[in-house]
Image: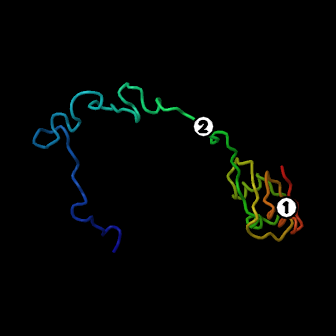
Amino acid sequence: MKLHELKNVAGAVHRKKRVGCGEGGGHGKTSGRGGKGQTARSGGSIRPGFEGGQMPLYRKLPHRGFNQYNFRTEIAVVNVGALGQLDNAVTDVNAESLAAAGLIRAGETSVKILGDGEITRPLKVTAAKFSASAKAKIEQAGGQAIVA
């Protein structure tokens, strides 16, 4: 069987609904839009939560609390095992070199190094944060973990 040989199941394809073509079609006169008013017009829609001018529920209820989402600091995460995949020419590892290698997104400046994986060669790693196991593995391999 090939893609061009596939056929729809019987009843899967419906004909297009033609509105405004006479009462006999079932969608004549108001064309399925009910009576007059805002919703009968083209482009006429009422936003969610609108209650016809009555004070909406979300404005009646008290709003309490605080959300830290807008003030968060996003930290990119890289494992020690991924540092071993960098080119041998790279000895100084920072956010720019990680972005160039494709391990983090370009423009991300805060990086945390985690301890999953192994590292065999000495690297000078500069990052915002290190987990304790990552710092131990980097220093055990003869490298440096510098908090920037």
Residue beneath the point at 70% across and 45% down:
73
Task: Give 85 or 27, whichever is nearer the viewer.
Answer: 27
Up-down relation of residue 7 to residue 98 (above or below): below
Kind of element beneath mark 1? loop
Tell me which numbered mark, 1 or 2, is placed earlier along the sequence.
2
Amino acid type at circle 2 is Gly
Q: Quadrant of residue 50 in the image? A: top left
Residue at label 2?
65
Amino acid type at circle 1 is Thr
The label on residue 126 is none
Task: Name the quarter where the N terminus is drawn.
Answer: bottom left
Specify how the rendered protein is coloured.
Answer: rainbow
Label 2 environment density (alpha carbons within 10 Å; few <14, some 14–19, many ≥20): few
In the picture, measured across the screen, residue 10 lies left or right of residue 63, that is left
Measured as percent of width and height from the top left, residue 110 is found at: 74, 49
Up-down relation of residue 20 to residue 83 (above or below): above
Task: Give 25 or 113, whichever is nearer the viewer.
Answer: 113
CA distance separating discs 1 and 2: 47 Å
Q: Quadrant of residue 134 in the image? A: bottom right
Residue at label 1?
91
Measured as percent of width and height from the top left, residue 48 is found at: 40, 36
Task: Give 118 or 98, whichever is nearer the viewer.
Answer: 118
Up-down relation of residue 7 to residue 128 (above or below): below
In the picture, measured across the screen, residue 73 lies left or right of residue 47, that is right
As drawn, the residue found furthest toward the top would be 53
Residue beneath the point at 11% across and 39% down:
23
